[in-house]
Image: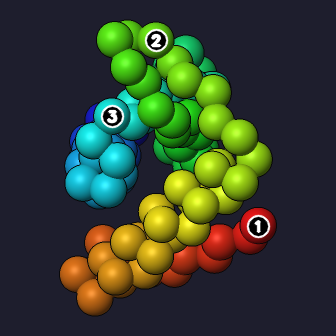
Amino acid sequence: MQEMNQVKELMVLKITELIKSIFPNYSVKIYGSHATSLCLHWSDIDLVVGPQVDNQDIFLQSFEIKESLRKISEKLKIEITRQWVTEVHYIE
């Protein structure tokens, strides 16, 4: 489990860096079973991503959310060539 946690932490770090390279004012937070340490080794990692200014979450309009997710998806697809991402499925 410890070895898997290190891999998952690295993945969250890489995703956070990728998102901040596109949106410097966005925060990435873990929630769900990983946040509560109730996860199993095969559990997915739930992330909430969004803009934050002065430690306050900013709420986006629907079109802004879709555009942000599209940009993140495009950037993740580029990362496939670096082999830490294997597939990206953006579903609007």
**What residue is at 75 percent from the left and 47 percent from the top?**
62
Name the spot of residue 10 as percent of width and height, x first. Answer: 25, 48
Report whether residue 87 is seen. Answer: yes
Q: Which amino acid does the dot numbered 3 rest on?
A: Asn
Colour setup of the view: rainbow
Which quadrant does the C terminus fall into?
bottom right
Badge number at residue 92: 1
Image vertical order of residue 87 relative to residue 1, above or below: below
Which quadrant does the N terminus fall into?
top left
Return the residue at label 3. Answer: 25
Name the spot of residue 7 as percent of width and height, x first. Answer: 29, 50
Name the spot of residue 67 as percent of width and height, x first. Answer: 59, 61
Q: Contact, CB < 8 Å: mark 1 with mark 3?
A: no
Q: Contact, CB < 8 Å: mark 1 with mark 2?
A: no
**What residue is at 46 percent from the left and 62 percent from the top?**
72
| Front position in the image: 55 or 18 | 55
Task: Using the numbered discs, state the Cα–Cα distance from disc 1 to disc 3 in whole angstroms.
Answer: 23 Å
| Front position in the image: 89 or 50 | 50
**What residue is at 31 percent from the left and 77 percent from the top?**
79
Task: Using the numbered discs, state the Cα–Cα distance from disc 3 to disc 2 in whole angstroms.
Answer: 11 Å
Badge number at residue 42: none
| Front position in the image: 2 or 78 | 78
Report whether residue 7 is seen. Answer: no
Dot 1 or dot 3, earlier in sequence: 3
Q: Secondary structure at mark 1?
A: loop
Q: Which amino acid does the dot numbered 1 rest on?
A: Glu
Q: Residue at the bottom extreme?
A: 81
Residue 89, image quadrant = bottom right
